[in-house]
Image (cartoon, rainbow, N blue to C red):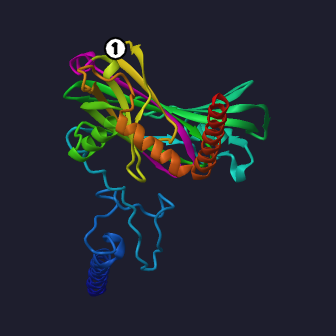
Amino acid sequence: MEGFVVRKVQMERKKRYCQFLVSFSLAVFIVFLLISPVAGSPSGGGSSSSSSGSSVSSSSSGASYGTSMGMSFLDVKPPAPKPPLPAGQFAQTYPIGFYGLNYNVNNQKTLEIDLGAARAAKAEVTPYPDRIEVYQHSSPAVLITFWGDGWEFRNGKVSGSVTRADFVTTPLIANISEGDVSGSVRVDLYTLIGPSELTKTIDANVTADIEMRFQNATSLQNLGYENAAFTMNVTKVLLEQTGAANLTFTVPPAWVTSHGGVDSVRIARISEKDHITQILDTRYLGEDINGAMKFTAYSPDGTSVFGMITTKAVMEKGGKPSEGQIMTDVGMLVWVSQLAFNNIYLVAIGAVIVVVVLYIGWMGWKSKGKGEL
């Protein structure tokens, strides 16, 4: 009986000892979790990947770094959202090219497209006898055309010689006070290596400085500045080597009618480098399927800031409005002066010829007079 009691006491001690070990281990584990770098961000103010998703562990993503030996993990956070655009502004960014697309590397006038990379970039590659079209149908979409022939398909790639290339964007649509407007561009492409971007921004808030530039540019063509519906700024990232551009704008018929009709509409360009403003040769293309009026212009100097404006004829002294680009007497004098300054040698030769002709004529007249006497 006495031995049974002793054994019972010993078992009770072992049970308490085991409970103590479990409790102590649990307490140590909790303290470890609280002081471990994995429990928070390196700065102590972040949240764990299990609660917010802003930190990605190394077991689920190769973008997180660190070890279980106490080294701090690097939080991988999503990029900050772009700030909202001011009222009256509308923008879209167009992806152009992708890794695996290389055109005119080292001025070789060749094209190589990795078809697997094209599928990964959600780009459709369509070959034709005289061209290859690459349609990047992410919203917004871009169609790139490479003109050439002799296409070769080998090892999952297509390659060949290219004579020229261009791309065209889907329209950027904006709803402004004048109604729905849109703008699209077609741009000559000289080089494309990997991914790049083009952003179009329509702005209904035309500043006084920009309007002054439009007014000065129209006055050089003996036109008066009337109104600007909007501007469209075209910016590029990793897309420096581009050429001439074609602009296509649509505007509501009511805006055109209330500002002088089709003949008054012009597309203007403000250079992003030196701010020189040009009035581009603008043509009316008719109405689109939605009834909006379409206008196009060719910009030999490429993309920049463009304005959709209207002009009016300037009244001359006789009361008749000027027709197109008519040069006044002062303008003619300035033009002749500039021509003489830029061609001084030709002017000198011309002056010598005039003097010789006058001298010969005078001598002939003098001889004729003596003969009559």
Q: Position of residue 225 (x, y in %)?
A: 26, 32
Viewer-closest of 218 and 175: 218
Residue 114 in view, yes or no:
yes
| Neighbours of disc 1 within 10 Å: few (<14), some (14-19), many (20+) | few
**Left or right of 150, for residue 313:** left
Q: Position of residue 124 (x, y in %)?
A: 60, 31
Tag 1 residue: 290
Viewer-closest of 148 and 66: 148
205 part of magenta stretch: no
Viewer-closest of 263 and 162: 263
Which of the 4 quarters of the picture holds residue 265? top left
Q: Is residue 265 above or below residue 290?
A: below
Q: Is residue 71 above or below residue 61?
A: below
Q: Position of residue 39 (x, y in %)?
A: 32, 70
Q: Is residue 52 above or below residue 252?
A: below
Q: Is residue 36 above or below residue 175?
A: below
Mark 1 secondary-structure assignment: loop
The stretch of residues the image draws in magenta is 235-260
